[in-house]
Amino acid sequence: MAEQPLNGAFYGPSVPPPAPKGYFRRRGHSRGCGCCLFSFFVKVIIAIIVILGIAALIFWLIVRPRPIKFHVTQASLTRFEHTSPDNILRYNLSLTVPVRNPNKRIGVYYDRIEAHAYYDGKRFSSTTLTSFYQGHKNTTVLTPMFQGQNLVIFNAGESRTYNEETIAGVYNIEIKFRLRVRFKLGDVKSRRTKPKVNCDDLRLPLSTFNGTTTFATVLPLKCDFDF
């Protein structure tokens, strides 16, 4: 569309005023500084990751840390009786559990050791064992005992499972250890951690009064050590 004259005069298209001297040069310089700063931070982060990775590799090559090993080597279940309608479970269970520290340079402080016994997902007994320090490449034997009675309520499915296992003479019991430990490397001690040890699938036969058992139990049973 043609431009219209104003007051008889004709004006061409308006022209913006020129940018200040050095305007484009300053804007380009700001963008360049931002990119340089971002690149510097990326390089610093990558360098830190590389240094930490090398340090972890050197530590592993020197120390060679290995997990603690729990095994159930012996188990004796002489009573496991659930009565109704009072829902009382009477039990007598003893275990032998060697704990092996396979590390050459790392010692372990067991500040707290709790052992819990479960049947069909229900905890029926607990005991606290004596704390101790375990040196390098050392084996310590734990002997948790669960004896007494406790209120354990079974639903219909759990009662059916209990009756079936009572007829078979073998009960599926789980033992769980809850620990508070510290690790020692030289004169340095770590912060306290709380690993969990689960001894599942422990099928125990009920011992008879003369000390024999109805079925042989496959032992030792390796337990899962989980941080």
Image (cartoon, helix red, strand yellow):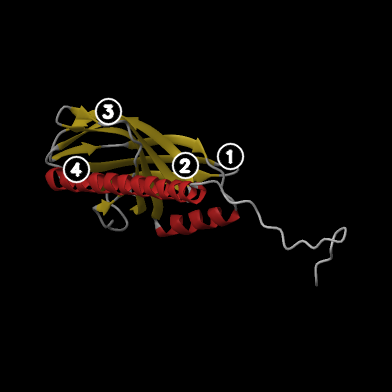
- Structural crowding at the residue carrying mark 4, measured as other residues with C-alpha within 10 Å and reported as few (<14), some (14–19) or many (≥20): some
- Can you identify the residue that label 4 sits on? 100
- Tell which circle, 1 or 3, labels the residue nearer the N-terminal end: 1
Does dot 4 land on a helix, a strand or a loop?
strand
- The label nearer to you, 4 versus 2, is 4
Residue 4 position within the rendered picture, expressed as x and y whole percent measured from the top left:
84, 65
Residue 218 position within the rendered picture, expressed as x and y whole percent measured from the top left:
26, 57
> Is 149 situated left or right of 64 in this image?
right
Whether residue 165 is visible here, answered yes or no, is yes
- Can you identify the residue that label 2 sits on? 123
Determine whether 217 is above or below 153 in the image: below
- The label nearer to you, 2 versus 1, is 2
- Tell which circle, 2 or 1, labels the residue nearer the N-terminal end: 1
- The label nearer to you, 1 versus 3, is 3
**Amino acid carrying mark 2 in the image:** Arg
**Amino acid carrying mark 3 in the image:** Ser
- Structural crowding at the residue carrying mark 2, measured as other residues with C-alpha within 10 Å and reported as few (<14), some (14–19) or many (≥20): some
Does dot 1 land on a helix, a strand or a loop?
loop
